[in-house]
Amino acid sequence: MASAVFEEIVEDFEFLDDWEDRYATVIDMGKSLPPMDDALKVPATKVEGCASQVWLHPEIEGGTFRFRGDSDAMIVKGLIAVLGALYNDLPVSEVSNVDAPAELARLGLNEHLSSQRSNGLRAMVERIRLHAAEAA
C-alpha cells in the first residue's frame, strides 16, 4: 500500500545498521522539507499531543491528498517528511486505508522513539486521517 517514495525510504533504512544512522537520515529528510509559510502556523493547523510545536496543513486538489508540515524539532520535522512520503499524493479516499503503524514499523522507528515522540507521531497520523476524512 505504501508509495514508491516511502518504499525507497524503507530500502534505504535496510542498509543502515544502527539507529544513529537512521536518526541522522530522518533529520536530513526534515532539513529537506520546503519551509512552511508562517501564515499557516495557526491554532487550526497545530497538532496537539506533541511535545514539540507541530503544524500540519492539508492541501486537497482534484481528490488528491497532500499536506505541508513544520516543527521546531529537527527529528519531528524528519518524521513529518516520512509521513509525507507515506501519505502525499494518495487519493483522499485511500488515506484511511494506510496502516501507518505497520508501515512505520518497517523503518524500525517504534523501538527508538521516546514515548512522547511516539505519542506525537500518532497525533500527526490521526490529524492526517481526520483531514482526509473531512475532505472525502
Image: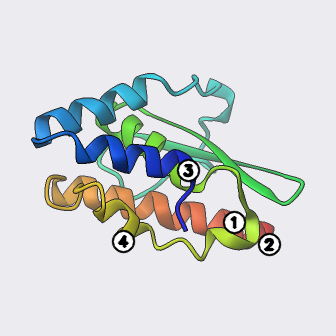
Name the residue beneath numbered marker 2.
136
On the image, the x and y values in percent for residue 76 come to 35, 40
Name the residue beneath numbered marker 1.
132
Q: Amino acid at mark 4?
A: Ala
C-alpha span from label 1 to label 4: 19 Å
Tell me the mark number nearer the camera, choosing from 4 and 3.
3
On the image, the x and y values in percent for residue 75 come to 30, 36
Instruction: State the residue in front, 15 or 128.
Output: 15
Nearer the N terminus, badge 4 or badge 3? 3
Q: Mark 2: which secondary structure? A: loop
Q: Mark 3: which secondary structure? A: helix
C-alpha span from label 1 to label 3: 20 Å
- Mark 3: few, some, or many residues within 10 Å (few <14, many ≥20)? few
Work out whether 36 lies above or below 131. Answer: above
Work out whether 68 lies above or below 38. Answer: below
On the image, the x and y values in percent for residue 72 come to 38, 30
Contact between labelled residues 2 and 4, with CB atoms less than 8 Å apart: no
Q: Amino acid at mark 1?
A: Ala
Nearer the N terminus, badge 1 or badge 4? 4
Q: How many marks?
A: 4
Name the residue beneath numbered marker 3.
4
